Image (cartoon, rainbow, N blue to C red):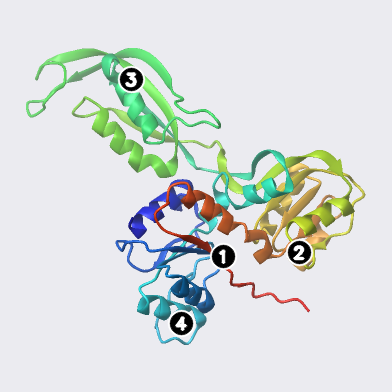
């Protein structure tokens, strides 16, 4: 198996187009055409992690945080990032990162945190906006099923927990083939009327190219008539953070103690207790304080995240309990997610969890 094939498996679960504009997920270092000898899973890439990969005989490191966020002008080894790149290249190591695309995808980081806590009825806290398109295409009746199935296979027609979703309306299309045409039906130079079906399907915007290819490959017409429309609907199968419900209410102190135990935290920062029972929970792994207002607007009793600013603890104003786990602690589960994705489809070489503690925050 090639490194490129491993990347395809990861991106099938967490497509790169789901990453935020500021992010730099994807292949960071290395040649994707090389065969894979072993994979090391980690949160951050450091020299110690690269040494660990070399010792284990791995030539692919899969991390959550990208090694490269900003362009580098020189490669002299003056920073830990440059040292990592040089060591990886010398040892023929590839480094791949899935960051905010793994955060935003259904079943990603926040979903894994929610599962550990035991939340039910999960959904994104802030569903993705402008993430959907509608395709409308006109197909001869006899070929409509073939085209529909091709669109479904390419990723169109998914709405929530349903697939193969479409709307179909019968009508008549007209056209006249020009002298250089090669018409599927009709005669050159004569007006033709064909009974057709108008097919409508919804698709994620990032699947537009794949769906268009499937449409053109399956449609019988030389010049298919089709349109894409941008939808203002939010897309509840991707987005930032997660909201869910506890099976039963818990008092605030008991809930926070349980969180501390689940994630084996040395400390857990939180805002003043509100005096309310905890039932509706909002959370976001990593630096999720930007979702605090969304959690309050949703009506959650508590918001869990990895980082928050000093003033955030004031800004909650008794409207919600804010609890901060630590950035590193809230994203350690990414290694588990990577393992679950890859182990289901890869059995020919070893996949390891990094044992290096890369948390830059220390506690006395």
- Badge 1 vs badge 3, beta-carbon distance below 8 Å: no
Between discs 3 and 4, the one toward the N terminus: 4
Q: How many residues crowd around disc 1 within 10 Å: few (fewer than 14), some, or many (20 or more)?
A: many
Between discs 4 and 2, the one toward the N terminus: 4
| Numbered badge on residue 202 | none
| Numbered badge on residue 145 | 3
Between discs 1 and 3, the one toward the N terminus: 1
The residue closer to the viewer here, 187 or 57, is 57
Instruction: Specify whether 25 is left or right of 136.
Output: right
User: Which-is-in-front pick, marks 4 and 2?
Assistant: 2
For mark 4, what is the residue?
A: 83
Q: Position of residue 81 (x, y in %)?
A: 48, 78
- Badge 2 vs badge 3, beta-carbon distance below 8 Å: no
Instruction: Specify whether 326 is left or right of 84.
Output: right
Q: Position of residue 148 (x, y in %)?
A: 35, 25
Q: Is any part of residue 128 visible from this angle?
A: no
């Amino acid at each position: 198996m090639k490194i490129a094939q491993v990347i395809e498996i990861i991106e099938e679960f967490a497509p790169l187009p789901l990453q935020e504009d500021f992010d730099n997920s994807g292949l960071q270092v290395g040649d994707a055409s090389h065969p894979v000898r072993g994979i090391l899973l980690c949160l951050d890439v450091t020299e110690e992690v690269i040494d660990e990969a070399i010792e284990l005989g791995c030539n692919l490191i899969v991390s959550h945080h990208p090694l490269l966020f900003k362009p580098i002008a020189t490669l002299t080894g003056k920073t830990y990032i440059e040292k990592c790149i040089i060591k990886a290249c010398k040892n023929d190591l590839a480094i791949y990162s899935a960051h905010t695309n793994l955060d935003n995808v259904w079943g990603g980081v926040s979903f894994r945190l929610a599962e550990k806590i035991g939340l039910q009825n999960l959904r994104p806290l802030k569903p993705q906006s402008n993430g959907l398109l509608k395709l409308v295409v006109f197909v001869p009746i006899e070929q409509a099923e073939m085209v529909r199935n091709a669109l479904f296979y390419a990723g169109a027609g998914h709405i929530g927990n349903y697939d193969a979703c479409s709307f179909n309306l019968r009508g008549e299309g007209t056209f006249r083939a020009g002298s250089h045409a090669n018409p599927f039906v009709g005669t050159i130079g004569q007006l033709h009327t064909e009974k057709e079906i108008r097919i409508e399907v919804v698709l994620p915007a990032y699947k537009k190219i794949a769906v268009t290819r499937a449409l053109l490959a399956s449609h019988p017409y030389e010049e298919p008539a089709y349109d894409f429309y941008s939808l203002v609907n939010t897309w509840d199968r991707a987005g930032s953070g997660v909201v869910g419900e506890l099976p039963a209410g818990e008092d605030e102190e008991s809930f926070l103690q349980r969180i501390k135990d689940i994630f084996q935290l040395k400390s857990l920062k939180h805002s003043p207790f509100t005096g309310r029972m905890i039932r509706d929970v909002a959370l976001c792994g990593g630096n999720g304080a930007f979702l605090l207002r969304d959690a309050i607007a949703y009506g959650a009793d508590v918001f869990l995240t990895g980082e928050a600013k000093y003033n955030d603890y004031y800004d909650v104003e008794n409207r919600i309990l804010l609890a901060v786990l630590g950035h590193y602690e809230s994203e350690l589960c990414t290694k588990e997610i990577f393992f679950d994705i890859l182990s289901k489809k890869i059995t020919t070489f070893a996949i390891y969890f990094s044992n290096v503690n890369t948390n830059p925050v220390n506690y006395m």
